[in-house]
Image (cartoon, grey):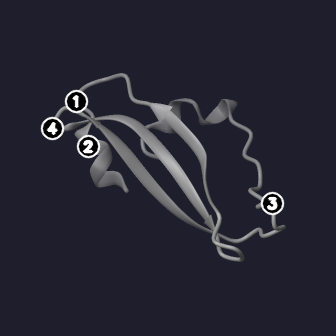
Amino acid sequence: MLDSADVVDGVVPKNARCRCGGKSFNLAVGFAPRGDVDVRWVYLGLRCTRDGVLGCCADWMIDYSPSSALLQQV
């Protein structure tokens, strides 16, 4: 996703599970900006469709510039 192609080989994905036992989620991507244009952080948020609990399942820092192209990839 986004700029993660260079690190995907070292990642082992895990299934998400809510405390209520729910396994179905709505997914949202959030960005924290650096200045007016660049992206500093990317967040993946989940909302359990069973009980509505929100959580962040992943985040990572973007340490290069320019990074505004990431905004068009979602």
Asked if disc 4 and disc 1 are in contact, CB closer than 8 Å, the reply is: no
Image quadrant holding the C terminus, namely bottom left
Which residue is found at the position 32% from the left and 23% from the top? Answer: 64
Which residue is found at the position 54% from the left and 55% from the top? Answer: 45
Label 4 SS: loop
Q: Which is closer to the viewer, label 4 or label 1? A: 4
Q: Residue 26 in the image: state x and y as whole percent.
A: 57, 69
- The correct choice, above or below, for 39 with respect to 25 in the image is above
Q: Which is closer to the viewer, label 3 or label 4? A: 3
Asked if disc 2 and disc 1 are in contact, CB closer than 8 Å, the reply is: yes
The residue most toward the right is 21
* Disc 3/disc 2 C-alpha distance (Å): 36 Å
The amino acid on which the numbered mark 4 sits, given as a three-letter code, is Asp
Q: Nearer the viewer, residue 39 or 12?
A: 39
Q: Which is closer to the viewer, label 1 or label 3? A: 3
* Disc number placed over residue 69 in the picture, else none: 2
Q: Which comes before the other along the chain, label 1 or label 3?
A: 3
Q: Which comes before the other along the chain, label 2 or label 4?
A: 4
